[in-house]
Image (spheres, grey):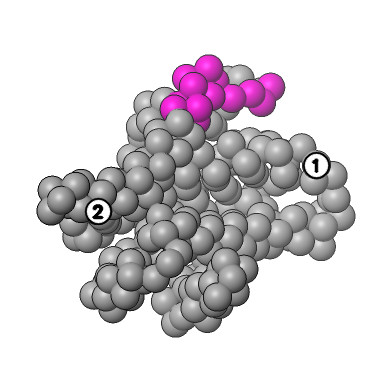
Amino acid sequence: MSKKTIFYYEFRRLVCSRTYLLLLAAVVAYCVFLLRSSVVFGTLYTAPFSKWTFCDYLSSVSVLLLVLLLALCARQFIPSERGAMTIISAAPTPVSTFKAIRYGAIACAFLIAAALSVGVCFAFYWLVFDYTVFGGLIWLSMPMLLPSALLVFGVSMLLGNKKAALVYVLLGVVLIVGAFRISLPAYIDIIGSSVTLPLYAGEREFAFTAAFAAGRIVFITVGITCIIISLWLPQKRLLHQESTYC
């Protein structure tokens, strides 16, 4: 079976699952709620389509997006999935390759949800305000959403390989931080709520703070490192066991 076929099968299993569809519907419903209840009025007297308001919107949506991502990650550690990995380990395709394909399917499923969240907002801007200058906002959505997602994804896959329950602990932490809007320092702000703090301090010209930008770089670095380790460790353990028996 080709890698492309395996990817298509894994991707279809994810996006057609009841969990994914329900969470995706929840994300879209929450986006509509935010657009009608807060975005339409703008953030602190800024325009609804300003960078400040858009980032504030993404910060709120990112909580549910991260929950969706963690739910997809947790799915990989249920007993049936672990049983499948045991069977796959006997196949010619390396386990690390198959896991990388699964990781790619999870990433694509998340990106669909993230793109839909951004697209709903853009549709709102177009229909309500006839605003279509989306280029700058698209670039803003990347540092707002992707580094945190990469960090959460990498850490959850690494922790899940150790103990599956730790993924749900991480999910609970994200929910608590998001639901209570806990103010975190910019360099560890996983939901991006600190981006609008300069606005409340009187700054009108939009810019990411140095601490926020540095934190995003750290998120990307740690996330990629955790992903590589989560792919490499099982194979390393297997080789270690083989060398022990020899």
Callout 2: SS = helix
The answer to whether 36 appears left or right of 229 in the picture is right
How far across and down, in percent of the image, does residue 109 sit?
Answer: 55, 64
Along the line of sight, the residue nearer the viewer: 16 or 136: 16
Along the line of sight, the residue nearer the viewer: 114 or 30: 114
How far across and down, in percent of the image, does residue 35 sit?
Answer: 62, 58
Residue type, numbered disc 2: Leu
* Marker count (numbered): 2
Residue appearing at x 41%, y 59% in the figure: 94
Pointer 1: what residue?
Answer: 135
How far across and down, in percent of the image, does residue 160 sit?
Answer: 26, 56
Badge nearest the viewer, 1 or 2: 2
The answer to whether 82 appears left or right of 39 in the picture is left
Q: In which quadrant of the rendered view does residue 183 lie?
A: top left
Residues under labels 1 and 2: Cα distance?
47 Å
Residue appearing at x 20%, y 53% in the figure: 242
Callout 1: SS = helix
User: Within 10 Å of the Cα at label 1, are there few (<14), some (14-19), or many (20+) other Cα atoms?
Assistant: few
Q: In which quadrant of the rendered view does residue 142 lie?
A: top right
Residue type, numbered disc 1: Gly
User: Which quarter of the figure is the N terminus placed in?
Assistant: bottom right
Answer yes or no: is residue 212 visible. Answer: no
Magenta residues, dominant SS class: helix
The span shown in magenta is 205-218
Along the line of sight, the residue nearer the viewer: 111 or 106: 106
How far across and down, in percent of the image, does residue 134 sit?
Answer: 80, 46
Answer yes or no: is residue 96 visible. Answer: yes
Q: Is residue 214 one of those drawn in magenta?
A: yes
Pointer 2: what residue?
Answer: 238
State the residue lying farthest toward the left. 245
The answer to whether 246 appears left or right of 235 in the picture is left
